[in-house]
Amino acid sequence: MKFLLAFLIAIFSSTAFAQTESASHFLPLTADVLLSEGMSEERLLRIDNMLDNAVNEYQIPGAVALVARNGKIVYHKAFGMADNQAGRELQKDDIFRIASQTKAITSTAVMMLWEEGKFRLDDPVSKYIPEFADAQVLDTFNADDTTYTTIPANNPITIRQLLTHTSGIGYGIIDGDDRFRKIYQKAGIVDLFTAENVTLEENIRKLAGLPLHHHPGERYTYSEGIDVLGYFIEVMSGMPLDEFFHTRIFEPLGMNDTWFYLPETEQDRLVAIQQKENGEWIYYTSEYYDPDYPVAGAQRYFSGGAGLSSTAADYATFLQMYLNMGELNGVRLLSRTTVNFMMKNQVGDLFSDSERGHGLAFGLINKKGETAGGRGSAGTFDWGGYFNTQYFADPQEQVIGVLMKQTRGDTGDETSWKFRQLVFQAIDD
């Protein structure tokens, strides 16, 4: 009897906080072959012309563009090449390294655990990852030998500050402050992704001992804080980050093409990262990052800030869940009330002179940004990735835009702002 009771408790514990069925039932994102959903077909063709021209003018080697409205895909096309040197044309279902678009998925996982009552947003992260206790702020730095001094932080780093890039944590090689690039590099910090034999836990525990840019909450500094939250998810859920993502988010939403590391059967769908040299597209190389990380190396590091690869359709599915206020296909990942406050500006007046704010997972367009034009209604949420991917979703217009490319370096690419502007001018209802 005791064994049976223990077994039932174990079963309950493993399923009590799994995805829940919903009274709402938004269907999966599907192609709209019969209705326009209030989008002009003629005006959407302007996207074709723009992307064709961008490929022909060598601004980009190729792109996949997707537009959805009211839960229906109204535009989904591929242009140009996936790999110029191999002569492979780009396909609509090809897989792209989405880099910082991973952040919204990690933030979603954090909020799913928050809904389970596991923590409060203004809890110090040191309550769950003790190495972050006694945080220090950089005071002086010696460029000759990279030694430095610190002063104690005036308050602890909170979960909310990690979500909003106000913790003071830096971002290594892509940091805007050369002092932190040198400090992180000397300490061997992984700041985006790696093919090396490193775990998330090892990296974040090491990161916790390094100085902050500023006192927590004082300023906005784009940071590796979302990677810290990736490890936080592992601590709070008791499972590796990739397993949490697949069992709690990807499988319920039907995001079957989203991975940290691609299975061998899917690797030929990975788009090459390319850079322009002497007017030709060549493979991108870096002394800091192995661009083949999704298919090569140890495959042990799960970067919550930048590690995922996905397709345009998969990521649009994720965004549609948010436009549906946390639900898709009868499965609710987040409450409507949770989605509502995640989409509120969470950084106070730190962006008071900007056209943007920042919620708990995304950048946000404010009234000033709406007035600027071509970016969506106030409340539109968006972000992009290191290898030139982008997304936006407008809750008021129920519009999603996803543009996937894989480039680095200055190529004269203007497709990002043009795509967004052309999506919104195509609304015709």
Image (tube, helix red, strand yellow):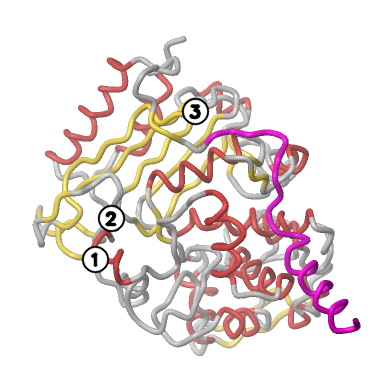
Helix, strand or loop at label 3? It is strand
28 vs 207: above or below:
above
Which amino acid type is shown beneath numbered disc 3? Val
Location of mark 1 (residue): 284
| Of the image marks 2 and 1, the number of the one nearer the N terminus | 1
Badge 2: residue crowd in 10 Å (few <14, some 14–19, many ≥20): many
Q: Position of residue 202 (x, y in %)?
A: 59, 85
Q: Nearer the viewer, residue 242 or 160?
A: 242
Compared across the picture, whether 2 is left or right of 410 comes to right
Label 1 – label 3 distance at C-alpha = 33 Å
Mark 1 or mark 3, which is nearer to you? Answer: 3
* Residue positioned 71% across, 80% down in the render: 150
Compared across the picture, whether 29 is left or right of 238 comes to left
| Of the image marks 1 and 3, the number of the one nearer the N terminus | 1
Q: Are marks 2 and 1 in contact (CB under 8 Å)?
A: yes
* Residue positioned 84% across, 59% down in the render: 117
Location of mark 2 (residue): 407
Residue 4 is covered by the magenta coloring: yes
Compared across the picture, whether 256 is left or right of 141 comes to left
Most distant residue in the right direction: 2
Q: Position of residue 54 (x, y in %)?
A: 20, 38
Label 2 – label 1 distance at C-alpha = 8 Å
Compared across the picture, whether 302 is left or right of 424 comes to right
Location of mark 3 (residue): 399
188 vs 15: above or below:
below
